């Protein structure tokens, strides 16, 4: 299997939503499909994300408007994985940041430090544990270096929760890729890889 990692661009919007259309979440309930619309750099105020179809429509709009950023993993013509990665300072208005990320320090924006944040991974169920998330992670880091970022930051959960236990990526994957724990709280971890 040869995996090709492609940066999400507006032209890939249909590939992006098709991946979420056909990839089950952990509970296999179609109505819970997220389309990753709550991890985008658009202000969530006044948005209705209550159904999968509404989230799908927002996903198309957000990808075309470059509000959702990240990388798709392809096996041939099929998308088999996704990693949401965006500039940390651009994500402070997103719905999931406001709801879940209160424990993450924000001092970098005042100090001129440029941080790339990794919010989630989705891998096709039949291809989990085959290194696809690691390939996505390495591409995020490579591009972050090229784009002048100082740090790549990730937020794995310390243990299973009411959410998918692995959408933030596994601690061990980050550790093997040169990340260290920067902050540890009862809510989760902040792991960082220094680029400069």
Image (cartoon, helix red, strand yellow):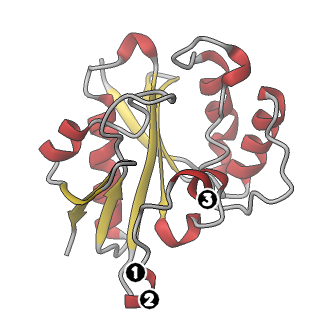
- Neighbor class of circle 3 (other Cα within 10 Å; few <14, some 14-19, many 20+) is few
Mark 2 vs mark 3, foreground winner is 3
Residue for badge 1: 107
- Vertical relation: 145 (above or below) 191: below
Element marked by disc 3: helix
Name the spot of residue 93 as percent of width and height, x first: 65, 65
Residue for badge 2: 110
- In this rendering, position of residue 183 left or right of residue 65: left
Q: Earlier in the sequence, mark 3 or mark 1?
A: 3
- In this rendering, position of residue 184 left or right of residue 12: left
The N terminus, quarter of image: top left
Seen from the viewer's position, the closer of residues 27 and 79 is 27
Mark pair 3, 1: CA separation: 16 Å
Residue occupying image coordinates x 82% and y 28%? 53
Residue for badge 3: 98
Residue occupying image coordinates x 55% and y 47%? 8
Mark pair 2, 3: CA separation: 19 Å
Name the image quarter holding residue 83: top left
Residue occupying image coordinates x 61% and y 40%? 36
């Amino acid at each position: 299997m040869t995996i090709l990692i492609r940066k999400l661009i507006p032209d890939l919007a249909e590939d992006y939503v098709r991946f979420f259309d056909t990839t089950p979440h952990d509970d296999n309930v179609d109505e819970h499909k997220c389309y990753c619309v709550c991890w985008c750099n658009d202000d969530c105020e006044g948005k209705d994300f209550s159904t999968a179809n509404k989230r799908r429509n927002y996903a198309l709009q957000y990808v075309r408007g470059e509000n959702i950023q990240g990388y798709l993993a392809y096996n041939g013509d099929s998308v088999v994985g996704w990693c949401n990665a965006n500039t940390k300072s651009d994500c402070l208005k997103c719905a999931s940041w406001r709801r879940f990320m209160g424990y993450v320090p924000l001092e970098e924006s005042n100090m001129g430090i440029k941080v790339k944040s990794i919010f989630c991974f989705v891998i096709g169920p039949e291809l989990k544990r085959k290194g696809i998330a690691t390939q996505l992670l390495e591409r995020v880091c490579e591009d972050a270096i090229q784009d002048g970022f100082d740090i790549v930051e990730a937020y794995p959960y310390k243990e299973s929760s009411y959410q998918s236990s692995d959408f933030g990526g596994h601690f061990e994957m980050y550790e093997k890729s040169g990340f260290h724990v920067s902050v540890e709280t009862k809510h989760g971890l902040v792991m960082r890889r220094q680029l400069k």
